[in-house]
Amino acid sequence: AQTVTQSQPEMSVQEAETVTLSCTYDTSESNYYLFWYKQPPSRQMILVIRQEAYKQQNATENRFSVNFQKAAKSFSLKISDSQLGDTAMYFCAFMIGHDMRFGAGTRLTVKP
Amino acid sequence: NAGVTQTPKFQVLKTGQSMTLQCAQDMNHNSMYWYRQDPGMGLRLIYYSASEGTTDKGEVPNGYNVSRLNKREFSLRLESAAPSQTSVYFCASSGRTVHNEKLFFGSGTQLSVL
């Protein structure tokens, strides 16, 4: 079965500090894409960052970066210089073909 | 550029009623998807359409039907709504048929079945 596990239901961080959200997944496939999506209270799903499984280099998007460990099937998200606007649910997901599987999410609160 | 548009945004049904959720995208994407999101869970795939004229079941298809009306539109129908179908429904689209690199999501439909 292809599953995604986010072991931290809730996290908090002080504004301007760094936080890391964990994600592990299970698949027997070798080619897939990994994603982090953000869902603020508006309910909109917003792509934060994505990673191709065949690339060893970790993806980076401004203050967001990932630590992709393919052998360990781990895909964590690091948010640097946290901002109040980063407060949201964060979902880890991976996609094989047309099948995208999501984790249960981590609720992140950035405190002033 | 509207992206992915879903209607309605909110709906309340009684058990046994039917309804259709509408979704349209203006990005000329080939693939479209319907997901549901329940409290404490991530999104789960109901059905998808890899290209115009094709549809396939996802992880949780029971109780739903879909229609890919044309390249732009992909509807989700509940023939006889049940309380277990109370959820937030998201439509999404992507531009590539084989190596789908990311999904663009609509703003969701909050459905309550009483």
Image (cartoon, rainbow, N blue to C red):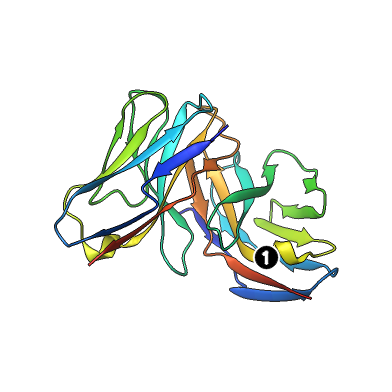
Q: Is residue B85 visible?
A: yes
**Image coordinates for residue A62, horizontal then vertical, percent:** 82, 49
Q: Which residue is mark 1?
A: A22
Q: Is residue A58 visible?
A: no
Q: Look at the picture and state if B38 lies above or below A68.
A: below
User: On the rendered structure, is B72 left or right of B68?
Assistant: right
Name the one closer to the observer, A62 or B108.
Answer: B108
Q: Quadrant of residue B86?
A: bottom left
Name the one closer to the observer, B4 or A76.
Answer: B4
Please give the count of numbered marks on the rendered protein.
Answer: 1
Q: Quadrant of residue B37?
A: bottom left
Q: Quadrant of residue A38?
A: bottom right
What's the residue at 60%, 60% (across, down)?
A40
In which quadrant of the rendered image does the C terminus of chain A lie? bottom right
**Secondary structure of the residue carrying numbered label 1:** loop
> Dot 1, crowdedness within 10 Å: few (<14), some or many (≥20)?
some
Name the one closer to the observer, B8 or A50.
Answer: B8
Q: Residue furthest left?
A: B16
Question: Which amino acid is tagged 1?
Answer: Ser
